[in-house]
Each structure stands twice: as C-alpha cells, then as structure tokens.
Image (cartoon, grey):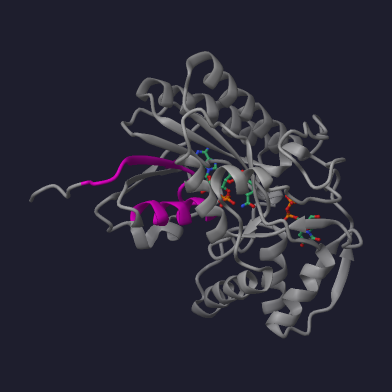
C-alpha cells in the first residue's frame, strides 16, 4: 500500500483528546497537516477524537507529558493540563507537575527538533485581577498557596519556562492566555459553569450559583478560540506573545444562568451555594493586541454559542452516551 502523501506539517497536540484539543486536531487536519495527538485521558476520553481515528493523517498516542517524549514533529501545541477547577483540584500535585514538567519536556523536545511551540496559558495568570479589563502587561494578583494555585502558579511557571527557552535557547515560542471558553465536547461533569448550568437546565434541576452570582466572566466560543490559536502559531518567529484570546463580552454568572434558562425553556430555579475560595470577582480580556497582531476577534455571540452547546449536551443526554466520571 502506498503511503498517503503529506502536504502539510507534522504537528503534535498535547492534551489533544480534551475539549479544546479535539477541535484543534480537527482544524489542523482540515488544513492538510499530519496530527499526532498525545493524551493521558486524565480529564477526557477517546470519545472526543473517535471520529478522527480512521483519518489517514491522524495518530493517537496515550502518554503522560510529565515523562519525556521522543517523536519527530515540526510544531507543538502544548494543551495538556486539566482546565476545570474540579479536575485540577482533584490531584493538585499532578496538576503542577503537568504544567511544569510537561512544559520542560515539551520545550526540550522543541529544542532538539528546533520546532515551533505554543503554550496554552490562561487568564488565571491574572488571578483575582485588580486591573480591569486585563491587559497582557498586568502581572496579576495570584495567591501562591490557595486551592487554585496548583493551576495558576503551574501555568505561570510554564510561561516563565517558555520565555527563558526563547531568551536562552532562541526557541520559537508562542504563549496565548485563554479566557473562559465553552462549546461542544466540554466534559459534562467538569464542574465548569457553562457545562454545569446547561446540564442542570436540561435535567430540570436547580441552577447552582456560587456566591451571589454577581462575579463576572467573559465567554468565548470554541471556534473563535481555535481560529486565534492557529493564527498565533503562524505569526513571525520573533512574536512570542503573551496574547490574550477571549471574548470581551462580560456577563455576571447570574446573567449566564438566566440566558441558559431562557434558551432551554427550563423550569429550573436559581439556588445559591458558598463561593469557592479565591474565586476571581471579575474577568474580561483586553484583546487590542490580538486584534493588532493576529487580526483576530471573536464573532460568535453568547446566545448563538450557547445554542450550539445546548444542542450538544441534549444529544449526549438523548443518546445515553455515558457521562464521564466526576472527579470531585
Ligand atoms: P480539557 O481538560 O478538556 O483538556 C485537557 C487535556 O489534557 C485532557 O484531554 C487531559 O486528559 C489532558 N491531560 C491532562 N494532563 C495530562 C498529562 N499529564 N499528560 C497528557 N495529557 C494530559 O481542558 P480544555 O478546556 O480543553 O483545556 C485545554 C488547555 O487550554 C489546558 O492547558 C487549559 O489550561 C487551557 N485553557 C483552557 C481554558 C478553557 O476555558 N477551556 C481556559 C484557559 C486555558
Ligand atoms: N460557578 C457557579 N456555579 C457553578 C459552577 C461555577 O456559580 O455551578 C461560578 C464559579 O464560582 C465562578 C464562575 O462560575 O465564579 C466560573 O467558574 P468556572 O469553574 O467555569 O471557571 P473559572 O472560575 O475557572 O473561571
């Protein structure tokens, strides 16, 4: 049998079976690239990439990025890391190891291969921000010893490593700071606010607002985010970021709950639960840099994105696809 000709690049996506990773793999395949998806399935299952398994340019490898990896690729997207508080607080030591050892291993791989490498960092590097909206030059307000620190400080250390590899080894590194992103293939039990509210509404359960629901977040639809991520990888070698990627539309958590109820037609009541510690009061990206450097801005409004997301969770419930185990 003759080998399938590859017109694109060989691209490694760590965390490729996760919510964002699976969409990224699809996009890269559609652009003609060869994709090596590496994941240890800590917060995902093969189901997210099942539809890609027969694709001639797709390969799935079970591997934990806290251990070295020896493969040959041209580009690396480093997404491996649980992203929801329920998941990353389940095994906080492993979360820090994934961010820090994972970054060291993937940067080491990029150094050997002289490959471009992009880090999926987060708005959590700003902690509970005192500057609003958040600009990339803001250093953040992060508790180093709280229950979110394994994620926040792990991601901050990974950013440090990316910038030191760039300065010290002239590596072509890129850092994006992702703000709350939602859409199909979110883990139904991950405890994140969009998946929680949609699942609760579809099941006719009460909607759980933590605190009084006046804290804000800015929600970006997955398709917009992936477009920005791929565009960042394509920028000139000397452009490292960090670049904020997110939707500047800002909503209180209560407003989000009301939108979900309106769109699902659910009879759910709003109920109030204690606010988890260190929960940021407000979050909204300043995306001036992304607009200027990437010619990027999000197009999908919250209502439209929620409709797609609700349809996805409805299909999970109606087909009886077993929800993944909760980690709390
Ligand atoms: P996700 O949990 O769905 O995906 C993360 C993937 O990484 C999962 O498939 C998981 O199994 C895998 N993984 C975890 N530890 C690993 C390890 N040690 N080795 C190999 N694979 C491992 O989360 P997501 O929302 O798709 O997030 C992807 C990336 O984007 C993460 O790095 C996250 O920090 C970042 N991010 C996401 C958001 C968001 O709103 N979705 C916001 C900010 C940053
Ligand atoms: N939240 C909530 N009810 C839920 C889940 C989350 O009110 O059932 C709140 C949470 O306290 C936070 C916001 O929604 O203020 C976003 O939470 P998420 O875990 O999605 O993301 P993050 O806090 O990491 O931005």
> Which residue shows up at 72% across the image and 85% down it?
265
Q: Give coordinates of residue 215: x percent, y percent.
A: 86, 56
Q: Give coordinates of residue 277: x percent, y percent.
A: 86, 45
User: Can you see residue 268?
Assistant: yes
Residue 99 vertical position relative to residue 309 in the rendered view, above or below: above
Specify the quadrant of the image occupied by residue 72: top left
- Within the magenta stretch, is there residue 238? no
> Which residue shows up at 41% across the image and 25% down it?
109
Specify the quadrant of the image occupied by residue 94: top right
- Over which residues does the magenta segment extend? 6-29
Viewer-nearest residue: 86 or 116: 116
Q: Residue furthest front?
A: 292
Q: Residue furthest right?
A: 212
- Within the magenta stretch, is there residue 18? yes
User: Can you see residue 41?
Assistant: no
Residue 244 vertical position relative to residue 305 in the rendered view, above or below: above
Residue 257 vertical position relative to residue 79 in the rendered view, above or below: below
Residue 116 vs residue 92: left or right?
left
Number of labels in the image equals 0
Q: Give coordinates of residue 270: x percent, y percent.
A: 85, 73
Q: Give coordinates of residue 17: x percent, y percent.
A: 46, 51
Residue 319 vs residue 92: left or right?
left
> Which residue shows up at 49% across the image and 78% down it?
319
């Amino acid at each position: 049998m003759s080998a399938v000709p590859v017109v694109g690049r060989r691209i490694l996506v760590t965390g490729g079976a996760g919510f964002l990773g699976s969409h990224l793999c699809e996009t890269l395949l559609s652009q003609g690239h060869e994709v090596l998806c590496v994941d240890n399935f800590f917060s995902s299952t093969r189901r997210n990439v099942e539809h890609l398994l027969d694709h001639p340019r797709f390969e799935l490898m079970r591997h934990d990025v806290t251990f070295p990896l020896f493969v040959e690729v041209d580009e690396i997207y480093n997404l491996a890391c649980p992203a929801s508080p329920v998941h990353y607080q389940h095994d906080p030591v492993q979360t820090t190891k994934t961010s820090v050892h994972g970054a060291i291993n993937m940067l080491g791989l990029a150094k050997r291969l002289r490959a471009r490498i992009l880090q999926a960092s987060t708005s959590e590097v700003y902690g509970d921000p005192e500057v609003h909206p958040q600009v990339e030059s803001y250093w953040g307000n992060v508790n180093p010893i709280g229950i979110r620190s394994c994620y926040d400080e792990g991601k901050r250390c990974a950013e440090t490593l990316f910038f030191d590899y760039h300065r010290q080894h002239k590596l072509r590194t890129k850092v994006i700071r992702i703000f709350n992103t939602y859409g199909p293939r979110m883990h139904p039990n991950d405890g994140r606010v969009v998946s929680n509210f949609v699942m609760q509404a579809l099941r006719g359960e009460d909607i759980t607002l933590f605190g009084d629901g006046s804290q804000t977040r800015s929600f970006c639809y997955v398709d917009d985010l992936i477009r920005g991520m791929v565009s960042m990888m394509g920028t000139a070698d000397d452009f490292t970021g960090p670049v904020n990627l997110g939707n500047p539309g800002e909503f209180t958590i209560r407003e989000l709950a009301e939108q979900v109820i309106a769109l699902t037609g659910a009879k759910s009541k709003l109920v109030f639960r204690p606010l988890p510690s260190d929960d940021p009061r407000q979050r909204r990206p300043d995306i001036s840099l992304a607009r200027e450097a990437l010619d990027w801005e999000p197009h999908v409004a919250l209502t439209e994105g929620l409709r797609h997301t609700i349809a996805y969770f409805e299909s999970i419930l109606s087909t009886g696809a077993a929800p993944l185990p909760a980690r709390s």
